[in-house]
Image (cartoon, coloured by chain):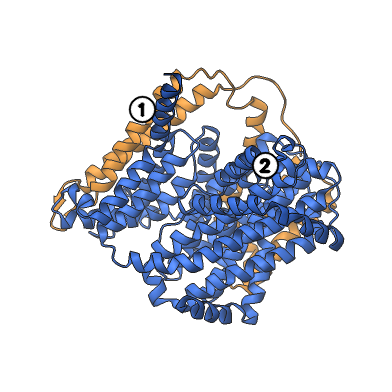
Amino acid sequence: MTTGSSSNTGPTHKLVEAGITLLIALFGVIVIAGSLKAGINWGAEGPRAGFFPFYIGIFIVASSAINLWNGLREDNDGLFAEWGQLRQVLSVVIPTAIYVGSMPFTGLYLASIIFIAWFMRWLGKYPWLTVLAISLGMPIVTYFIFERWFMVPLPKGPVEEWLGL
Amino acid sequence: MEELVNLFHGFAVALQPFNIMVMIVGIVLGVLIGVLPGLGGANGVAILLPLTFSMSPTSAIIMLSCIYWGALFGGAITSILFNIPGEPWSVATTFDGYPMAQKGKAGEALTAAFTSSFVGALFAVVMITLVAPLVASFALQFGPAEKFAVYFLAFCSFVGLSKEPPFKTIAAMMIGFALAAVGLDSITGQLRLTFGVTHLLNGFDFLIAVIGLFGIGEILLTMEEGLAFRGGNAKINLRVVLQTWKELPAYWITSLRSCLIGCWMGITPAGATPASFMSYGIAKRVAKKGNNFGKGEIEGVVAPETAAHAAGTAALLPMLSLGVPGSPTAAVLLGGLLIWGLQPGPMLFVEQKEFVWGLIASMYLGNLVGLIVVLTCVPVFAAILRVPFSIIAPLILVLCAIGAYSVHSSTFDVVLMLVFGVIGYLLKKCNYPLAPLVLAIVLGDKAEEAFRQSLLGSQGSLGIFFSNTLVSSIMILGLIALFWSVIQQGYTRIRGGAATA
């Protein structure tokens, strides 16, 4: 496996944690807003649909406020991750996002072949023969296990249609 | 006596040829999951859940529970041979297991780990056989308030016993509850928190969350940390196994203590990880060779492995008898039961006797099969672990995508899985526990239903949760669990004050 650059810079843990906590608080506010829309008081069937999530939203906001306070008070100057490490993470997240996004159009098999091949060739620097063997082998094994033996249909695209699968 | 008769019927179910085959397949897949980095018990079971859709519920749950046992066994292989804990509960096993392997005693360490795992699981299964029916019949008296009190106790235990900061645990748990609330309200039939997005009408499926949070999140963490394989050869043969078995009875007190710790930590949903650490810590303090712990002491492998397996198995007791899972993997199994239209809880013992006892019998057999499989196949599994991460990672990611898609045949779920994966990575890095989040997604609907039904009965008065001895006791236990760390700190301070006075 390749490793990222080992520069000792990157976003601080405190900063990222504060950002995450604020995002969680924002999620809490959205839950509160949605609950208010659904109704938080009593109706004919007792507590209305928004009653329970409303208090959940309040808990989320309140606990986030405490977490933010604790996080900012903490004496933690460490790094969340080095830039090289984050690049390494993104080098997986971005292709996976493209893989997932292309699945409705290409089907699972073709997308998987390209994704595995890319991963092995780019990150693993494997010879093309190994890349082809595994990137073609895995979807074929998957097809037999899931679709033939356990009868679980997986998303298909034009290639599978052309092959009559 | 009735339990024994039921258990024998259960063995008749579990010993059907198809179920034995399913058991072996499940164990092998489970060990593979335990061995591979980035795959854990919970998301391994979630990914493979679709494979069981065409089976009967009994065969399906046997396969899934065997994947679970296999994953519990598999974690020890990587810990001992490569100093890489495949699962969090295997961390304590590395302390003495890896030094043993470095001294050329890998075979002894692996045999001790597998045998201890088996002993821990067996102890917990016997406990489940004897106690679960009693708990279930007791729980039949429960109304909505008592049901909510049990959920309250389970969630408070998570906050009180979690090693993460309590407000982070609460925040994670509440996110889970909020996600569970999205979609159709089961009581009023009204839509909520969907904000007009049609994909959210059915809410968030916990399986998607599990695959994303645990599977993708773990891969991202591994990608960041890098992975260096540095293992020796795994030699294990009959002579080593028999030699180690001869040695193990000397540690029966450690085993028994670890079994008890494991069962307790499994039932209160603290889980296998704290159980293994606690058991290791106590063993180190009281063992005759305590000073040698960390240098390759066999007792240092026996203690955490016994406790982890006992806890992992005992976590199924509250799931079966109360419908409250004691661990994330138990939560996934519970979700599986719901998919097959089975309602875990006390009525399961009345309405689905064959299923429950088939499952309990399979726990005995599954662990025995597991022990045999791991003892005979260690070199194979160790060889698999040498496959570089840049090959394993994309295969796991593709498997995760297949698992997420298969739940509802929806590509939107695959997108959600990736979103959950990134969230899981960020939350884990910021020390937010993921287990309570998943449990809250699974149990959110049920807890809310019990809460609202209770309030409906009391015209909105919270006094209903303290209206009789049973519900009050459970609620008070919950409050004690919630404030456990505060109580402990106060106790220590008082003792410290008394000592200095």
- Where is residue B70? Give x, y as percent: 65, 60
The residue labelled by disc 1 is A65
Residue B171 shows in the view:
yes
- Tell whether A61 sits left or right of A125: left
Compared to residue B444, the image places residue B52 above or below, namely: below
* Mark 1 residue type: Ala
B221 or B299, nearer to the observer = B299
Chain under numbered label 2: B
Cα gap from disc 1 to disc 2, whole angstroms: 45 Å
- Where is residue B131? Give x, y as percent: 45, 65
* Quadrant of the image occupied by residue B282: top right
Q: Which chain is blue?
A: B
Q: Which chain is orange?
A: A
Task: Judge depth for marks 1 and 2 and give the one in front.
Answer: 2
B313 or B188, nearer to the observer = B313
- Crowdedness near tag 1: few (<14), some (14–19) or many (≥20) residues, C-alpha within 10 Å: some
Compared to residue B409, the image places residue A77 above or below, namely: above
Task: Indicate the secondary structure of the residue bearing disc 1.
Answer: helix
Chain under numbered label 1: A
- Tell whether A97 sits left or right of B188: right
B134 or B453, nearer to the observer = B134
Which residue is found at the position 62% from the left and 79% from the top?
B15
* Quadrant of the image occupied by residue B69: bottom right
- Crowdedness near tag 2: few (<14), some (14–19) or many (≥20) residues, C-alpha within 10 Å: some
Q: State the mark number for residue A151.
A: none
Which residue is found at the position 37% from the left and 51% from the top?
B180
The residue labelled by disc 2 is B287
The answer to the question of whether label 1 and label 2 lie on touching residues, with beta carbons closer than 8 A, is no
- Where is residue B305? Give x, y as percent: 65, 51
- The quadrant in which the C terminus of chain B is found is top left
* Mark 2 residue type: Ala
Residue A114 shows in the view:
no
